Image (tube, rainbow, N blue to C red):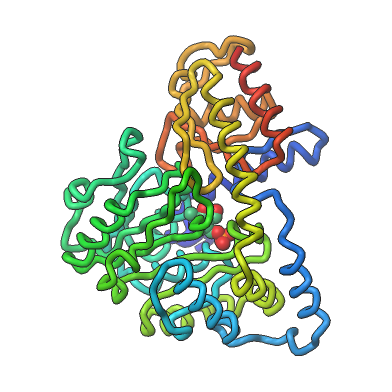
Amino acid sequence: WQTLSDRVASVAPSATLAVDSKAKAMKSSGIDIIGFGAGEPDFPTPDYIVDAAAAACHDPKNHRYTPTAGLPALREAIAEKTLRDSGYEISPDQVVVTNGGKQAVYEALQVLINPGDEVIIPAPYWTTYPEAVKLAGGSPIKVFGDADQGFEPSVEALEAVRTPRTKAIMINTPSNPTGAVWGEGTVRAIGQWALEHQIWVLSDEIYEHLTYDGEKTAYVGALVPEIRDQLIALNGVAKTYAMTGWRVGWLVGTIPVAKAAAKLQGHMTSNVADVSQQAALAAVAGSLDAVAAMREAFDKRRKAIVAGLNAIDGVTCRTPKGAFYAFADVSGLLNHPISVSGAVAKSSSELAALLLDQAHVAAVPGEAFDAPGFLRFSYALADEDLAEGMRRFKQWVG
Ligand code: PLP
């Protein structure tokens, strides 16, 4: 009678959070760790956002529950922002403000999935997707994008796994972990395929503003307008405004989807903290100047890390076009002694553990994203730390 539920037993712990917490624990025990693990901007949240939150804190009317689906002004601002960025009109009633983009992913799946339903997840994928599918009683169906095709899945590959139980497909561009930005052609083709087969599209657009080399995020809801009746767009302030810890995300769906998600949230977490919503309102209703400055800094680091990784024997890294991750193929370092320490890693997971223990450099193993043989390096860290981390990695490999 003391056993825990099958549901929770079926879920894997978050590998990205595990690396981050091990690195943080080593750091707090006095070890000088260079952390490429965390998916969070190192910049402070812009002042005007913090000021809005501080002002909200001082006003006692903001110490109450808000409507479950979010502050009306924030839902309105999200509707306006959707028109500005994604290029199509929605009503504020279609928006539900969630505790981070992660809760938006979770709720979207809870709202759509029945036991046995299948959700196609292009791999490599963000580590939470398959677990959130399983928590909803569904089966994650993984489709691998070829590195040579920029990790973009082809419609043929999706069609090959489609069954009568295929309920939804998860798309994420710009992508965590690969940094890939899918082309308009791919996004349009996937949208049309989903429309034809009555498959829901869950489009995670959280890295939308972090694109480089003139690339632009392709929005399926704009490219295939008819898909909007079977689309849930997922987003949040974490990555755009350096607001990971504020925990504000949202989903945009049809009105029945939004109502269902709000009903669920009403029994789960109620509303997002009012003060965080006020901060998000300042962010979303404000300009994109701060993100432009962050994007410039990320771009510089992106070039530095790709050069640094490619300078290490046994490592190859394509130039990512979005987000803030470099996804390096480290298969050349496996199964033979790594020269300086003589250690042998049989997998990228073992390599990540050795790199952390011996060189004090934290990176996330590809296994976390169903891409063994790769390491993910987040370049959301200071320029000097990035350079030092690359120096350590190179020296450790020898
Ligand atoms: N989606 C993707 C692809 C992510 O990488 C993340 C965070 O790492 C999220 C969603 C969720 O972000 P948050 O819950 O912090 O808003």
Quarter of the image holding residue 123? top left
Image coords of residue 282 (percent x, y) = 67, 74
Q: Is residue 319 above or below residue 163?
A: above
Q: Is residue 358 above or below residue 180?
A: above
Q: Is residue 153 above or below residue 256?
A: above
Q: Which residue is at a point 55% across and 26% down the rendered structure image?
A: 307
If the image is split into quadrants, where does the C terminus sit?
Answer: top right
Image coords of residue 365 (percent x, y) = 51, 35
Image coords of residue 358 (percent x, y) = 67, 23
Q: Which residue is at a point 61% across and 74% down the rendered structure image?
A: 285
> In this rendering, would 316 be left or right of 295?
left
Which of 23 and 180 lies nearest the eye of the viewer?
Answer: 180
Image coords of residue 187 (percent x, y) = 31, 56
> In this rendering, would 47 be left or right of 177?
right
Quarter of the image holding residue 287? bottom right
Q: How many marks?
A: 0
Residue at the farthest bottom position: 61
Q: Is residue 299 above or below residue 67?
A: above
Which of 158 and 183 lies nearest the eye of the viewer?
Answer: 183
Q: Which residue is at a point 32% across and 41% down the rendered structure image?
A: 145
Which of 65 and 77 lies nearest the eye of the viewer?
Answer: 77
Which of 398 and 139 lies nearest the eye of the viewer?
Answer: 398
Q: Which residue is at a point 52% across and 15% down the rendered structure image?
A: 313
